[in-house]
Amino acid sequence: MQEDRIRRLISYAPAGFGAVVLVAALLAIATAPQLPVGGLPAAVVSGSVFSLTNQERASEGVQALIRNTKLDRAAQMKAEDMANKSYYAHVSPEGLTPMHFVDRAGYSYLMVGENLVVNRDSAQEVISAFMGSPGHRTNILRSEFTDIGVGVANGTYKGKEAVFVVQIFAAPRAEAPKSVPKKIVSIEEKIATPKKEEVKPAPLPALAEKVEDALSPILVPIAEATSTAVVASSTEETVLVPAFSISSTNAIELYAVEERKPISARERVQQSLRSWLKQFQARFVF
């Protein structure tokens, strides 16, 4: 359409001015801001990707995602990072994971997923590519995800101009309820001192059994990580990077994004009991 206007200007221009009009038109094209995905603004593309994503969820009976401004910021930072550094992967050359950008955006998450695509001409092509890949489709239709952010950026990839589109899915971490200070009411009352009853010591084997019984129900097995982050570099612009999905508990194992909790008083008591029991059993043979 822009080329047709240029041709009309040149045809209507007086003799000798055609070349001037042509040069001015070419300069206007060269200095015009680049628009991603088929010439559409990034905001339009990201909005269409969001709408089409919810259409796919609705067709499968899954609740619609809520667009989150913090996740939008995280997805945009990731898209611009790939565009500026010319890479196409879930983990940057410096080792930055999707959770890095989510944390920077200030979103407190329970689980995170990420879809990436490069060089598609429209939002519909972006969603079609995602839905044609099992991993990306799973992220889009996963009912545990409630929020989404979308980022679009222009850059270079393998020496050519490219458009990067990022989807970040997440489920928020529930905020801890605020503690309400309780009023302390002092009540004075006379309490009769109970008589001390003679307690006979239990036989040593029975005591050992009771200690074992007291310990065994308290021990909680450590949950094993069930999902892993799959990272692979693509060999062609049309190849999708495998989808990424991880929960915050697995993030502790894989990326150490959360600090481990200090040992509780109850666990210290358990450890002391275990240590005492081992020493006791080592001294006595039943």
Image: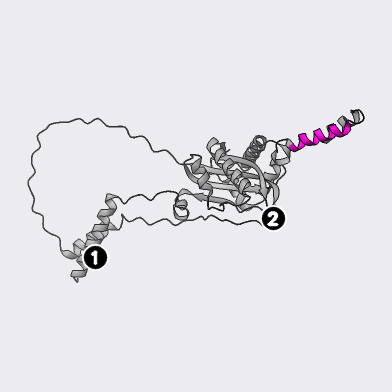
Distance of label 1 from label 2 (alpha carbons)? 61 Å
Q: Position of residue 61 (x, y in %)?
A: 60, 41
Residue highlighted by disc 1: 278
Q: Residue at x 53, y 50 (%)?
A: 97
Give the label on residue 194, or none: none
Q: Is residue 217 above or below residue 19?
A: below
The image shows residue 208 at horizontal and vertical percentages of 21, 63
Q: Nearer the viewer, residue 253 or 97?
A: 97
Which image quadrant for residue 283? bottom left
At x 24%, y 58%, the residue is: 272
Residue 120 vs 214, above or below: the answer is above
Residue 223 visible in the shown view: yes
Q: Which residue type does callout 1 highlight?
A: Lys
Type of amino acid under label 2 = Glu
Rendered-image quadrant of the C terminus: bottom left
Asked if residue 285 lies in the magenta stretch, the reply is: no
Query: Hey, which residue is sitting farthest bottom in the picture?
Result: 285
Cβ–Cβ under 8 Å for marks 1 and 2: no
Q: Relative to the observer, which residue lies in front, 185 or 83?
A: 83
Residue 193 picture quarter? top left
Q: Is residue 85 above or below residue 147?
A: below
Mark 1 Cα within 10 Å, few/some/many (few <14, many 20+)?
Answer: few
Q: Which region is colored magenta?
A: 15-30
Residue closest to the eye, 47 or 165: 165
Residue 266 drawn at (x, y percent): 27, 51
Q: Quadrant of the N terminus?
A: top right
Viewer-nearest of discs 1 and 2: 2
Please state the horizontal and vertical placement of residue 105, each as a whole percent of the image: 51, 39
Q: Which residue is mark 2?
A: 236
* Mark sitting earlier along the chain (1/2): 2
Q: Examine the rendering and report whether any part of residue 62 can be seen.
A: no
